């Protein structure tokens, strides 16, 4: 069991019924685990000269962006909720499930031409991350990648961003995911749809569809443009 399986706690039906809340507080409260998180995030950053600053969303994004910015001697830009900054440079609004939210960055925090990393603890629908991308662009900066500790794959939030997106821990599946599975029909199948909490429908290379237990998923397969296959650990 890795540190993420051990220390990220899933709370069912929080904050509302039907939601699985991924609680990172046990991960943060363990010193060795928290250190490993920062090291894992740091490994995903582009080369030193290809980044100038990190922008992070209030509030859990600050937890991870602060040590990353410090150990790399890079600037940290705080994207704060509306009304928290004494001098606002730029603001951006985005849709919530019910209503709208606005985040703001300080005046002068991003200079024209700054190469900026977008960072947060989690990406779901991608609304707040896209807002940070837009803030960087408004300030004249260049958003070069987005980095998250957790991604909820079924939400497909990465599609909104328009920049390379990396996540350390992935939960769930999105339509079209290529899966390596334990099955007599073959080792690879595409995820089609969710049947229930324990089973999914998949389609094999020969076009045959089949109900499959989630327990039969070995990993998610990601195929790069050059044909290279990389593997993402599947977490439900």
Image (spheres, grey):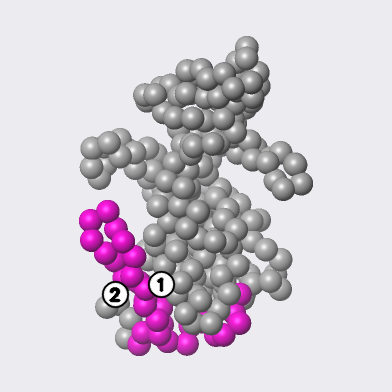
Q: Is residue 23 depicted above or below 97 in this figure?
A: above
Apparent side of residue 205 relative to residue 55 in the rendered image (left or right): right
The answer to whether residue 195 shows anywhere in this view is yes
Q: State the quadrant of the C terminus.
A: top left
Tell me residue 32's x, y (percent). Answer: 54, 48
Residue at x 33% of width, y 81% of height: 85
Q: Which residues are magenta?
A: 87-115
Q: CA distance from mark 1 to mark 2?
A: 9 Å
Discs 1, 2 touching: Cβ within 8 Å: no
Q: Secondary structure at mark 1?
A: strand
The answer to whether residue 30 shows anywhere in this view is no
Residue at x 45% of width, y 24% of height: 200
Q: Is residue 133 depicted above or below 152 in this figure?
A: below
Tell me residue 121's x, y (percent). Answer: 45, 55
Q: Residues within 10 Å of mark 1 (few under 14, many from 20)?
A: many
The residue lying toward the viewer, choosing from 23 and 13, is 13
Residue at x 23% of width, y 61% of height: 99
Within the magenta stretch, is there residue 29? no
Within the magenta stretch, is there residue 114? yes
Residue at x 27% of width, y 78% of height: 83
Q: Is residue 96 depicted above or below 228 in this figure?
A: below
Disc sitting over residue 199 in the figure:
none
Q: State the quadrant of the N terminus.
A: top right
Apparent side of residue 157 relative to residue 85 in the rendered image (left or right): right
Residue farthest to the top? 184
Q: Secondary structure at mark 2?
A: loop
Q: Residues within 10 Å of mark 2 (few under 14, many from 20)?
A: some
The residue lying toward the viewer, choosing from 2 and 148, is 148
Disc sitting over residue 82 in the figure:
2
Tell me residue 127's x, y (percent). Answer: 39, 60
Which residue is labeled 1 in the image? 79
In this figure, what is the number of numbered marks? 2
């Amino acid at each position: 069991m890795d540190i993420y399986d051990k220390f990220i706690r899933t709370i069912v039906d929080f904050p509302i019924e039907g939601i699985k809340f991924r609680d990172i507080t046990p991960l943060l409260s363990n010193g060795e685990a928290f250190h490993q998180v920062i090291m894992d995030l740091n490994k995903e950053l582009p080369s030193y000269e290809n980044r100038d600053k990190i922008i992070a969303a209030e509030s859990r994004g600050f937890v991870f962006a602060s040590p990353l910015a410090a150990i790399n001697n890079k600037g940290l830009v705080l994207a704060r909720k509306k009304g928290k900054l004494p001098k606002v440079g730029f603001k951006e609004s985005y849709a919530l499930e019910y209503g709208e939210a606005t985040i703001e960055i300080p005046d002068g925090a991003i200079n024209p031409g700054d190469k900026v990393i977008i960072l947060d603890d989690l990406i779901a629908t991608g609304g707040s991350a896209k807002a940070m991308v837009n803030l960087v662009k408004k300030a004249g900066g260049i958003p070069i990648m987005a980095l998250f500790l957790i991604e909820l794959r079924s939400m497909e939030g990465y599609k909104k961003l328009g920049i390379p997106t990396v996540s350390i821990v992935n939960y769930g599946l999105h339509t079209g995911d290529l899966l390596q599975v334990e099955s007599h029909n073959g080792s690879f199948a595409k995820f089609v749809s969710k049947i229930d909490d324990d089973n999914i429908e998949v389609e094999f290379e020969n076009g045959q569809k089949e109900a499959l237990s989630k327990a039969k998923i070995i990993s998610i397969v990601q195929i790069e443009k050059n044909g290279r296959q990389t593997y993402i650990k599947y977490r439900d």
